[in-house]
């Protein structure tokens, strides 16, 4: 019998075990093996039914994977720079317009303004002026500002069916932006983010993990990272950049 308080899920499980026990007594070892397999399957199915526990994305992990999206935008720009120099007529403005819009919304309005400039840089500026990370903040902000000017330029010249700028000049601007932001993100990943994590207490860091998640929800109303990654996949597909095997360096042998 099953206790009144036993749930339907438990009842089904106990029923299966009971059936297995009868099978063991009447049919010997083969049946015993079969019943054990059945029981194992029931337990397995019960485990598979459960939703896996969501794993928390911590604040620095969040910032670094955002850099991953921005680096994929930079790859679009650097590939465009190469193609502009080979055959400018091959360049379609549409994927560049989408990339610049994504960089603006995800990189500039969210990652830079809502996270780095609001939480990281002010905290680092409180540190001793002699600290390596504190010395970086002014130039990093200046690079954010320069990046926004360049994004504005990319948006303006890619809004029509044809590029609204001289191909060589445009390629130079794109490559200048890529060069700046590659250095920028690399220093943030290796100097700024670790220094900021060291500067806050463990309790503050836990709260900031939640705060960053909340800001992402407010900004995008959904999983901003997943949506940005989906947009990158589409942009890369439209420029034949999806297959990374094409970027394996040639053998030197
Ligand atoms: Fe930054
Ligand atoms: Fe950054």
Image (cartoon, rainbow, N blue to C red):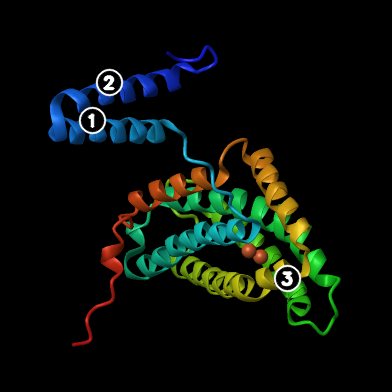
Q: What residue did someone put label 3 on?
A: 198
Q: Earlier in the sequence, mark 3 or mark 1?
A: 1
Observer-side mark, 2 or 3, equals: 2
Q: Is residue 193 left or right of residue 86?
A: right
Q: What residue did someone put label 1 on?
A: 35
Q: Secondary structure at mark 2?
A: helix
- Quote the CA–CA distance across marks 3 and 1: 55 Å
Residue drawn at x 68%, y 58% is: 112
Q: Is residue 165 visible?
A: no
- Cβ–Cβ below 8 Å for labels 2 and 3? no
Q: What residue did someone put label 2 on?
A: 19
Q: Is residue 194 visible?
A: yes
Q: Is residue 126 left or right of residue 95?
A: right
- Cβ–Cβ below 8 Å for labels 2 and 1? yes
Q: Residue 64's spot in the image, x, y percent?
A: 57, 62
The part of the image, by quadrant, that contains residue 193 is bottom right
């Amino acid at each position: 019998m099953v206790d009144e308080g036993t749930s339907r899920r438990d009842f089904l499980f106990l029923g299966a075990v009971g059936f297995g026990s009868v099978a063991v007594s009447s049919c010997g070892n083969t049946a015993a093996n079969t019943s054990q397999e059945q029981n194992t399957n029931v337990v397995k199915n019960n485990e598979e039914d459960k939703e896996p526990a969501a794993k928390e994305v911590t604040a620095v992990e969040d910032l670094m994977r955002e850099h991953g999206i921005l680096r994929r935008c930079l790859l679009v720009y650097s590939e465009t720079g190469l193609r502009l120099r080979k055959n400018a007529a091959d360049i379609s403005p549409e994927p560049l317009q989408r990339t610049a819009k994504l960089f603006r919304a995800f990189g500039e309005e969210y990652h830079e303004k809502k996270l780095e400039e609001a939480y990281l840089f002010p905290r680092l500026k409180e540190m001793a002026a002699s600290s390596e990370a504190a010395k970086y903040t002014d130039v990093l902000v200046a690079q954010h500002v320069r990046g926004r000017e360049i994004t504005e330029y990319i948006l303006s010249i890619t809004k029509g069916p044809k590029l609204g700028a001289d191909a060589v000049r445009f390629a130079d601007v794109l490559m200048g932006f890529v060069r700046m932001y590659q250095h920028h993100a690399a220093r943030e990943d290796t100097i700024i983010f670790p220094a900021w994590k060291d500067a806050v207490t463990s309790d503050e860091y836990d709260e900031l993990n939640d705060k960053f998640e909340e800001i992402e929800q407010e900004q995008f109303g959904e999983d901003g990272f997943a949506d940005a990654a989906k947009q990158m996949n589409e942009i890369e597909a439209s420029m034949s950049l999806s297959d990374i095997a094409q970027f394996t360096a040639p053998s030197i042998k």
